[in-house]
Amino acid sequence: MFTISLRQLHYAQIIAEEGHFGRAAARCHVTQPALSQQIRLLEERCNAPIFDRMGKSVRLTPFGRDFLTQATRVLSAAQDLETLADVSAGHPGRPLRFGLIPTVAPYLLPDMLPALATELPDIQLAVSEGKTDRLVSGLADGDIDMALIATENPHPGLAETVLFADPFVLAAPCDSPLSDPVDLARLPRETFLLLEEGHCLRDQMVDACALKPELQGRTFAATSLTTILELVANGYGVTLLPAISLKREQANARIKILSLAAPGAARTLRLVWRKGSPHEALFRTIAAIIAQTGERHLASEIAA
């Protein structure tokens, strides 16, 4: 009877996420037959099927769900063990995998990366973008080490530190009769344009504007603020804009930016990582650098 390998557990985890052997094989950088063979061996070892093969789709069996719950813990523990080995050498032995949400990354990275490189020259980063759910899943699975998000801590297994508050402003067509400061409560709800489902900024706009469910469908499936602002410029409506994006996004002369009347609205940016990580002290140092850089960036955006 052979021992279950971490590689087999990793393969099973990726197949469960993708629901498809072909996509999982591509993501694992192996051939589909090689992936399938490892899963067959794993199921033989368990003496039970882990996946139901239903045509082109794949889903976990009841046993598979229980098995993967345990497998995820094992993989996370293995990742922590590797991290501990890195710490014993005095610093991470590989680039730290850093995920950011798309409504933060393009605005903060140009200032953030040079600041981190100056303050922590021995630390390398592997940066990626992803929506909040994907980043949280990546942290839980050990695929990333830390993430910058704009929601409250969504997972009990994550530690966090607050970075800074990012206030919202209103973007409207240049010929809009609106003037500073805008009272959100008085704006027609049907004029708001939203990002597609899955963006935390969409959810924050829904909450800030108290949009009813029937009005939350006003979305053009836009994946970026740049696309939404192009719709605003063409007179389709208005949208909320995080202040950190002002310098980059307000360059469009067909849009005017308006402040919000008190109490206004804002989102809070946070850095999160897995609880118990041996790199927690380093993550807190990184968070302090990001917070200082972000607040300077925010001050220059608002003053511009």
Image: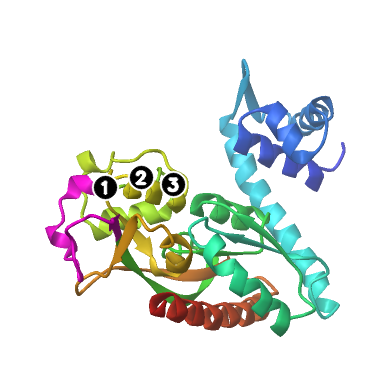
Residue 1 lies in the magenta-colored region: no
Query: Label 2 to label 1, Cα distance in Å?
Result: 7 Å
Res 60 label: none
Res 227 label: 3
Q: Do we see residue 274 in this rendering?
A: no
Return the x and y of residue 189 as percentages of the image width and height.
18, 49
Res 231 label: 2
Quarter-of-image position of residue 183: bottom left
Which quadrant does the N terminus fall into? top right
Where disc 3 sits, the SS reads: helix
**Viewed as shown, does residue 185 lie left or right of 143?**
left
Give the magenta-colored segment's residue range: 171-191
Is the residue marked by circle 1 packed among few (<14), some (14-19), or many (20+) residues within 10 Å? many
Where disc 2 sits, the SS reads: helix
Residue 185 lies in the magenta-colored region: yes
Q: Is label 2 in contact with label 1 (beta carbons under 8 Å)?
A: yes
Return the x and y of residue 193 as percentages of the image width and height.
31, 47
**Label 1: which residue?**
237
Which quadrant does the C terminus fall into? bottom left
Mark 3 residue type: Thr
Mark 1 residue type: Gly
Return the x and y of residue 108 as percentages of the image width and height.
55, 69
Mark 2 residue type: Leu
Residue lying at 60% horizontally and 46% vertically, measured from the top left: 69
**Viewed as shown, does residue 185 lie left or right of 288?**
left
Q: Do we see residue 285 in this rendering?
A: yes
